[in-house]
Amino acid sequence: MNYESRLQTVVGELAREVNPVSIFTYGSYNTSDFLPGISDVEIGVVKGEEGQQITQKLVELGNEFSSRGVILRVYPFSLVQLQKSDVDTPHTKSVFLRLLKARGRTIYGEQIVENLIPPPITLLDAYREAVNSTSRALDGWLFFREGLSTQGLEWAYKGTLYGTRALSFLRGIFPVTFLEIYELSKELELPIKWEEHVDAAYRIRTRKLRPNKNKSTEFIFSSITYCNQVVEPQIKAELQETDKVLIK
């Protein structure tokens, strides 16, 4: 069963079970970033007031219709929160919503995601993304040292590429795909060492580079350094005039 037919099957079941206002796909599935057999397919289910009360049912349906090589991740969204551009997410809201609009595609019901009005991305948002990128890269090492090398490299390259995207915000640019981030990185005037590191991150993402264990360890630690010693300071420097000490 291919992806689209699998989606049609799960959409029919979701419509019957939870009576949603809208169902949409988002994430890498609708972009050139999608890697068949590797990437998850993210599905958003929009309900009314009780939209946040159906999480377990959605998880079960996602698991039921997933198979080897086709992993479905089903998440609830509140209609009211989407309409207010104020979703309950651990991600930077302005960035998450902009990506949701750019990469979302309605496959059932009302076109909610296409009509989102994302809030502006502020300097503070950019800094939060930089800090989140450092955390992602660190997660890469935590996975890797537990023997989960694939997940470790994934979180490390995502930390690197998302950190690079945060730098692009300083230029007023919002790249959507990994390819766009990679291409923009060449315009950021990074030191050659870090330009090569971003290049390696993109090649690992696209499966054109498969480092051995030693090289993987080196890449992951370099990702942490890049995020917290290159990306974070550059964005934080822009915040100095409005920054203030909260606790001495």
Image (tube, rainbow, N blue to C red):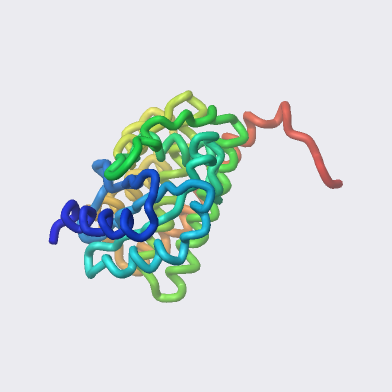
Asked whether residue 66 is in view, the answer is: yes
Residue 140 located left or right of residue 211: right
Quadrant, the N terminus: bottom left
Residue with the most extreme top position: 172
Q: Which residue is at the front of the view, 166 or 99?
A: 99
Q: Which residue corresponds to the image point at 32% horizontal and 35% vertical from the top-left?
A: 180
Residue 57 pos. (x, y %): 42, 65
Q: Which residue corresponds to the image point at 50% horizontal and 68% vertical from the top-left?
A: 142
Residue 236 pos. (x, y %): 63, 36
- Please say if 176 is above or below 61: above
Q: Quadrant of residue 240?
A: top right
Residue 186 pos. (x, y %): 36, 32
Q: Which residue is at the front of the view, 126 or 193?
A: 126
Residue with the most extreme right position: 248
Q: Which residue corresponds to the image point at 73% horizontal and 28% vertical from the top-left?
A: 242
Residue with the most extreme left position: 1
Q: Which residue corresponds to the image point at 30% horizontal and 66% vertical from the top-left?
A: 212
Q: Which residue is at the front of the view, 97 or 157?
A: 97
Residue 169 pos. (x, y %): 49, 30
Q: Which residue is at the front of the view, 181 or 215?
A: 181
Asked whether residue 229 is in view, the answer is: no
Q: How many marks?
A: 0
